[in-house]
Structure formats: C-alpha cells, structure tokens
C-alpha cells in the first residue's frame, strides 16, 4: 500500500499555516497602521550651519536664563525648585541639562532652544495666536547672530555631557521619558526612583509627592501618561521607537511631545524597557537553544524506538 | 409482593427527601453568587451639571461603568429637535440639555469612542454608531445608550436614584 | 474471601491486591489497535501530553498567582515573570500550550469527521469529545481572565453580556454571573475557582469517559473496515505479528505515538521560546481598565469562527446562531444519515465537498472574526456565516441521499 502520510502531513501543515497567516501577520497588518522609521534623522528640522564655541555657549546659557528653570548638576547649578513645585508651575518638571547634549539630537536641541513648540511637535496644543504659550520660553537671541549663539549653546551642552558609552539604559530613559512616565517595575516614579524607606510614614509622604506631581502632569497632558513597565510586551520595539521619533505619526493630536532622542539613545531606551518588561529574555534565549537541541535528540530516539518496535509488524 | 412494593415506595420516598435537600442547597449556592451588599450599596454618584462645557464629551463613573455626559451645543440641539426620539433622550437641567448615558454599547458592552469631528460615537468592537443624543445610527446595537436612573436636584444629577423624569423615560420606552 | 499467597515479587504482591497484570493487559498490551491507521491517530496522545504540560505549568503558576483585581496583573507580570526562577518558562509553556491544544483538538476533530469515526457504535466517543471541546473552551476562557489585562477584562465583559439574551435583556442574570455590575473582584474570584478547580475536574472526568467510550468499539481505521478483533488478536498472539491486522497499544502503537509526540514537541518548544506572541496577546500586557476599550477586541484565535457567526447579525439572530454553532457539532452522529463509514473522499461527491467546504469556511470565519468588521470583511463574514448554517441544515439531506459504497 502506498504511504499517504506525507500527503496528509502536507495538508495539515498547509491549512495550519494559512490560518496562522490570516489570523496573525495579515490581520495585524490590516489592524495596525504601519509607520516607517525615519532613522531619527529629524529631516524637518534645519541643520546647524555654524560651528559652536562651548566657552561662549557657557556664558549664553547662564545669561539667557536657562538655569532659571533648569538645573545643570555637573556645572554645580541646582534646580531652583523641587520637582513637585516645578510641575505645578510648568506642568512638567524641566529636565536637568547635564547630559541632554549626548542623549538628544543636536539639531533638535538647536530648534528646541529657538522654538520649543515646533521642535517638540506640539504646535497643535500651543497656538501662539490663541495666546497658548509653551511653558518653555523661546530664546530670542542676545543681540548677536542668533544661529551662532544657539550653535554655541548646543556646543556647550555637548561639552559638559558624559561620553556616549557612559550613558546607561536607565539614564537615557529617565532623561527622555521619565519625567512623564513611571516604570513601577523598576521603582521609577516621575520624580525619581522610590527609595526604600525605613518608616512607612516616609514612604507615604513620598507617594503623596508623586501624586501631587501627577496631578499637575495630568492637568498639563490631559491625562496621566501611562506606566511603561510592560510596554515592551504590550507594544513592540518598532512601535515604541517610531512613536518616540514622532508621536504624531501614530497618534495624531496626542499631547505627547517629540523628545528628540538620537538613534543610539533610542536603543538604550528600548533596552531599559526590555529590562523592565522582558527581564528574562537572555535566559529565555539561552535556555531555548538547549531545549531545542535536547528535544531534537528526544525525537530521534523516539523515532529509532518506533522503527525497532515496528520491524516485526510488517 | 406487598413487602416489595413497600420497599419500592420507601426507596422513592428517600429519593424525594434527598432531592429536597439538594434543591435547598442549590438555593444557597445561587445566593452565594449574588452581588454582595457592599457592592449594591455603593451605587450612587452625584454630578454637578454646571461643570460641563457645550460639545465637550466627558466620561464619569457610576457602578464601575463609564457614564457619558455631553452638554448639547446649539448645533446638536437643532439636530436633535428634528427627531422627536432624539430630543426625548436628553435631560434638561437648569435650562441646558444634556446627554447622560451609560457609555457601553448596547450590543455587547464595549465603550464606543466619541468622534468630535462628526459629533457621534463609534464602537470599535462591532462597528455600531450612536449620534450625539445617544440614539443608534448604525447597527448592530439594538437600542440607544441606556440612561442610568437619575434624579434632578437643582443643577445636580443624582445617578442611581429613579426620579420622576427618569421614570417617565422608562415608561415611554426610551430607556430600559 | 480471596486467597493470598506469599508474594514472589513486588509485582506479584501488587497483582494479588490490585490485579495489575490484568490491568496492564486491558489498558496496554492487549488493547488492540488496527494497523491500518496513520499519524493522525496519534493526536490523542499529543493531546494527553499537552494537557499534562498545562497541568504541570499551571501548578507552578498557581503558587504565586494572586486572584485579586489589585494584584493579579502584577503577580503575573512582575512576580512570576521577573522574580520566580523559571516563572517565565511556566507562563510561556502554559500560554502556548493553551493555544496549541486547540490546534490539535481541531485536527483531531476534523480527522474524526473525515474518517467517519463517530459512526457505528462510536457516537459516544464523538459526543464525549465534543463535551471536552466545550469544557476546554470554558477552561481557556476562564484562564484568559486571570492575568487581568485589558483583553481579560473586555473579553469578560463581552462574553458575560451574551447571557443577557439580547432582547430578553436579562441583566439580572449577567450581574449574577459577574457578582457585580461589571467584571470586578467577585468575577475574578469565581473564574479563578472555575479555572483551577471545577473545570479541570470536569475535564479529567470527561477524559476518562472519552477513553472508556473507545474501549468497546475500538478505534476506527483509515477505511472504516470492521475488524474481527478476537480473530486478529489471536493471530498476533500466536506469533503472526506481520500477518495480523491489529497490534498492541503498548509498545507497538505507543512507540509511534511517542515518535509523533517527539516531532510535535519540537514544534511546540519552538513556539514557546521563539514565537509566543500569537498565544499571548500584546494587548493583555496592558492592565485592565474599565473606562477604556482597546481599539480592537477579538477573542483568542480558536474562538474566532464562532465569534464571527455572532457578529454580522442583529443581536437576537446573532445569539441564536451562536448557540447553534456551539451545539451543532455535538449532534453530528445523528445528522449524518449515510450508511457509509469511510474516508470522506470515498463517500461520493456531495459529502466530500461538504467536508472540505466546512474546513475552508471555518478558516474563513476564523480570519474574518479577527479582522475589523468593515467593508469587504463584513460581507465575507456574513456570507461565510450563512454558508456555515446552510451546510449543517443540508447535512441530513445530502447524507441520506448517499449511496452505499
């Protein structure tokens, strides 16, 4: 008798794969808009044409009043107020500028200094003609060539920042995302990492500060930005990085700003989110390989056993 | 013979007594699955209707369900007046008209999303649509949004209490 | 009183008290299986192994899972996935096995339909099998509630709403099932109980019934041939192993079972480690939020075909047809009026077309159940749902006209 099993197996595999294709790749392709990555080129932002001078930049940053709102820890300039009060004043705590020079794109920084709502891509929310000013005051120039001045300021920010290799995943995340988004699984809140408190009272006091901060943030953003602990699994790497690159591409009209990270910073942010929501991925890959090798050996032995038992049956 | 039938009878009688016990315990099981008194008691929400802006959809919460509150803009109201069924669905508080509805699709209970550009609601689950007064504008939902029991108290609305206005709506078959 | 002698071995000691030798003969060595079968007959063993994987992984998940609405999500995604050593492995095995078990059930089911394995005294095998399908469905659904993510909550909301009976508007019944106005603590608590206790007990009982129903009629074979098991087994025991039409379950057929299981496990562990996304929906990694419906709500893939039968109609007709789809497979042995028990392709054109159309149509329904209900997808879904119902209504007619082959 002819052996029909290969044909039967082919039929089973065929229908299984057709079902899988329709239900998974095809259905998700139809349901979710595909956004192509722009490789963090920020093509809509003008290039920096001048060569910046960090010395001049230092003076400009001080004189332009940046430190009226921002701290620069590495330069010994503390924040003028704590995170909760800052959020009450501006909606969100203005970032420390120590490492923005390495985490954020230079073109983005330059445009941000000149026209915050434009660089952040939130002009739909801050329409100057309707008197809606972005809380960050634009830099109007100190009397010289404004483009030169901005180039100097960017050069200064880059000069004080740590080297790119020293940027940790957590640092990239906290700088770019962490003032709006908590990551509960990494004990991160919008006002910093929650320390281990000895007394319950101190822990509760900290929680109240977080809640006060969140109230301001909620009023500023329209709703509380979500905790990102599991976002690497509930979204995916491509979605997250194209969303961060330009939130409007995915969620037209969203209050989430473009934060202007470099491609390298984005990789670090993704790594941080993987550490939070897919912590055991390295273990999974390593064990997966061993289990696959074992199970193939298991199948081979099962096959040999079957062959031996069936030798007498035909 | 007599003995046999008597044994048969006692067997059946024992069966009947056992069945009474079984039914009795079923009643207890049914009741154990009922909503708890604490769940039932936490069922009132008061809304201050002067807080809402015209044409701006706000979601409140009542008994764990979303409540859509939409103060009707003049444009919406004109449209609603064209259709008596629509205007009857609106609640008048201190001279303004409001749509106050349980924000769950009457088909299978998903939360439809408000579309400000077209002033209507669209359900992502099965494609049902509702207009700005909460009436069905596209199937499959069998009826407009349900209106929660309410009582008008000055410019406040108490959800969970059945006032005369709500009772009238219910009697007229506008809501369930 | 039974007479006991001094045992000559542990096995003998057990045999005097438990009749293990007899048991071994009945269940294993003299449980006769026809030789004229193919690897599809090993799906039962594949299902047993998958069920064991589910029970074992479930036991380990149960030790850290917390069935409260406040803690459920974190106990799964933080405690089990991050803290418990190998917790992620149990969860992935459990999630993937819950999905794959349905693939195998469907293959097992369509094998039964194709070869007519629900006829000639095998009706109860089919019925107990379909009851297992229904309890497995309930088990899968209740398990899906437990991580308390967005899909858990909204699937719970949508499915419990089905019990309002459309225009009957039995809200009281829905609230009774939930124990609250919306899915909340009472709901999670009772579905947790169902998932870890009542339904597994029911499944184990039904598996016993399913196997028991198989013992007297024996398993079917590729040609639906009636085999004289007494004669053929005697031939085998007399030494003509090759000439007999039957073989022992153990070790003869079991060795083939294990070979298929081995190949299946390669596929299974590939999914567990490298392609688990289809079984663990991304949306369910967002915590449950009763005030925000996800953009797309769809059940797991194995429920899609019956969900799609519900969807294109108004709520009352939809519910009636949905109910029809749930029970109609159970009635198959009584709806098939044909005198033939053999492969579908040999039963004449009509049934052959019926079988392949049913298979393809269910795949179409499955695909449309996931795709958004818009435009061409709505239309295809509607047509496929109607075809499904018509096919079942036509089955008694086309099979009673079938000629004996």
Image (cartoon, rainbow, N blue to C red):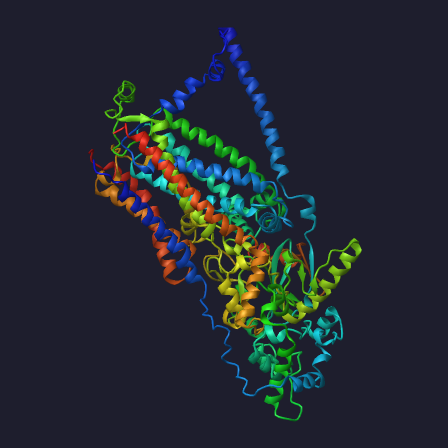
* Viewer-side residue, C271 vs C226: C271
Horizontal and vertical percent position of residue A202: 79, 57
Quarter residue C19 falls in: top left
Horizontal and vertical percent position of residue A95: 67, 73
Image quadrant holding the C terminus of chain C, namely: top left
Residue C279 in the figure: left or right of residue A81 = left
Res. C80 in view:
yes
* Viewer-side residue, C371 vs C204: C204
Quarter residue A55 falls in: bottom right
* Viewer-side residue, A12 vs C82: C82
Looking at the picture, does residue C94 appear above or below residue B15? below
Horizontal and vertical percent position of residue B44: 69, 54
Residue shown at 64%/49% (left/top)?
C71
Q: How many marks?
A: 0
Looking at the picture, does residue A180 appear above or below residue C378? below
Residue shown at 65%/89% (left/top)?
A141
Looking at the picture, does residue A287 appear above or below residue B8? below
């Amino acid at each position: 008798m002819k052996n029909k099993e290969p044909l039967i197996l082919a039929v089973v595999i065929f229908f299984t794969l057709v079902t899988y294709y329709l239900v998974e790749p095809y259905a998700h392709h139809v349901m979710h808009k595909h956004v192509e990555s722009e490789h963090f080129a920020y093509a809509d932002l003008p290039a920096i044409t001048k060569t910046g001078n960090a010395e001049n930049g230092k003076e400009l940053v001080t004189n332009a009043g940046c430190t009226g709102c921002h701290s620069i820890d590495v330069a010994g300039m503390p924040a003028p107020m704590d995170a909760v009060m800052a959020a009450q004043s501006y909606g969100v705590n203005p970032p420390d500028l120590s490492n923005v020079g390495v985490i954020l794109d230079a073109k983005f920084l330059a445009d941000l200094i000149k026209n915050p709502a434009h660089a952040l891509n939130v002009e739909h929310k801050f329409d100057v003609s309707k008197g809606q000013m972005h809380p960050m005051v634009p830099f109007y120039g100190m009397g010289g060539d404004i483009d030169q001045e901005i180039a100097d300021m960017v050069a200064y920010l880059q000069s004080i920042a740590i080297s790119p290799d020293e940027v940790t995943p957590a640092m990239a995340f906290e700088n770019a995302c962490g003032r709006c988004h908590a990551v509960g699984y990494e004990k991160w809140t919008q006002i910093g990492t929650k320390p281990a408190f000895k007394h319950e009272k101190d822990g509760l006091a900290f929680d109240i500060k977080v809640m006060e901060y969140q109230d301001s943030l909620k009023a500023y953003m329209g709703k509380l930005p979500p905790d990102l602990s599991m976002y690497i699994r509930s979204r995916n790497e491509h979605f997250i990085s194209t969303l961060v690159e330009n939130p409007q591409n995915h969620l037209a009209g969203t209050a989430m700003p473009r934060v202007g990270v470099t491609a390298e910073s984005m990789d670090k942010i993704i790594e941080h989110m993987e550490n939070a929501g897919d912590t055991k991925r390295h273990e999974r890959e390593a064990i997966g390989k061993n289990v696959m090798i074992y199970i193939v050996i298991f199948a081979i032995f099962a096959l040999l056993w079957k062959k031996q038992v069936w030798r007498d049956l035909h | 013979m007599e003995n046999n039938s008597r044994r048969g009878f006692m067997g059946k009688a024992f069966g009947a007594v056992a069945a009474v016990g079984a039914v009795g315990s079923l009643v207890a099981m049914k009741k154990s699955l009922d909503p708890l008194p604490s769940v039932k008691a936490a069922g009132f929400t008061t809304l201050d209707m002067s807080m809402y802006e015209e044409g701006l959809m706000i979601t409140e919460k009542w008994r764990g369900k979303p409540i859509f509150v939409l103060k009707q803009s003049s444009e919406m109201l004109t449209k609603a007046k064209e259709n008596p069924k629509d205007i009857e669905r609106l609640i008048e508080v201190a001279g303004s008209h409001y749509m106050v509805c349980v924000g769950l699709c009457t088909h299978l209970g998903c939360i439809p999303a408000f579309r400000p550009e077209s002033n209507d609601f669209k359900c992502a689950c099965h494609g049902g649509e509702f207009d700005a007064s909460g009436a069905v504008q596209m199937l499959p939902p069998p009826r407009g949004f349900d209106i929660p029991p309410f009582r008008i108290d000055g410019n406040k609305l108490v959800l969970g209490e059945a006032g005369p206005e709500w009772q009238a709506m219910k009697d007229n078959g506008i809501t369930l | 009183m039974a007479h006991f002698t001094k045992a000559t071995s542990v096995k003998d000691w057990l045999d005097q008290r438990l009749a293990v030798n007899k048991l071994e003969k009945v269940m294993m060595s003299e449980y006769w299986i026809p030789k004229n079968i193919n690897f599809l007959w090993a799906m039962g063993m594949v299902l047993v192994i998958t069920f064991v994987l589910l029970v074992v992984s479930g036991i380990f998940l149960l030790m850290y899972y917390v069935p409260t609405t406040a803690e459920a999500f974190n106990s799964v995604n933080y405690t089990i996935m991050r803290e418990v050593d190998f917790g992620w492995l149990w969860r992935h095995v459990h999630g993937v096995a819950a999905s794959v078990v349905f693939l195998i059930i469907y293959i097992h089911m369509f094998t039964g339909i194709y070869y007519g394995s629900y006829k000639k005294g095998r009706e109860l095998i089919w019925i107990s099998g379909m009851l297992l399908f229904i309890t497995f469905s309930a088990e899968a659904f209740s398990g899906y509630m437990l991580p308390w993510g967005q899909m858990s909550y909204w699937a719970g909301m949508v499915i419990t709403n089905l019990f309002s009976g459309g225009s009957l508007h039995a809200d009281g019944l829905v609230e009774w099932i939930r124990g609250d106005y919306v899915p909340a603590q009472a709901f999670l608590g009772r579905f947790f109980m169902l998932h870890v206790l009542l339904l597994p007990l029911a499944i184990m009982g039904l598996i016993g019934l399913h196997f028991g129903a198989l013992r007297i009629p024996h398993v079917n074979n590729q040609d639906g041939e009636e085999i004289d098991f007494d004669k053929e087994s005697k031939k085998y025991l007399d030494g003509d192993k090759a000439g007999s039409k039957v073989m022992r379950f153990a070790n003869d057929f079991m060795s083939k079972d294990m070979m298929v299981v081995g190949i299946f496990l390669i596929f299974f562990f590939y999914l567990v480690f490298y392609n688990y996304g289809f079984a663990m929906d991304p949306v369910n990694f967002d915590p449950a939020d009763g005030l925000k419906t996800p953009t797309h709500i769809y059940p797991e893939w194995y429920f899609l075909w019956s969900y799609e039968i519900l969807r294109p109609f108004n709520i009352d007709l939809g519910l009636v047809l949905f109910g029809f789809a749930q029970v109609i497979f159970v009635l198959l042995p009584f709806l098939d009026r044909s005198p033939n028990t053999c492969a579908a392709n040999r039963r004449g054109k009509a049934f052959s077309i019926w079988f392949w159309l049913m298979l393809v149509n269910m795949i179409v329904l499955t695909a449309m159940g996931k795709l958004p209900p818009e435009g061409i997808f709505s239309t295809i879904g509607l047509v496929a749902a109607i075809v499904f119902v018509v096919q079942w209504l036509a089955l008694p007619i086309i099979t009673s006209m079938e000629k004996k082959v």
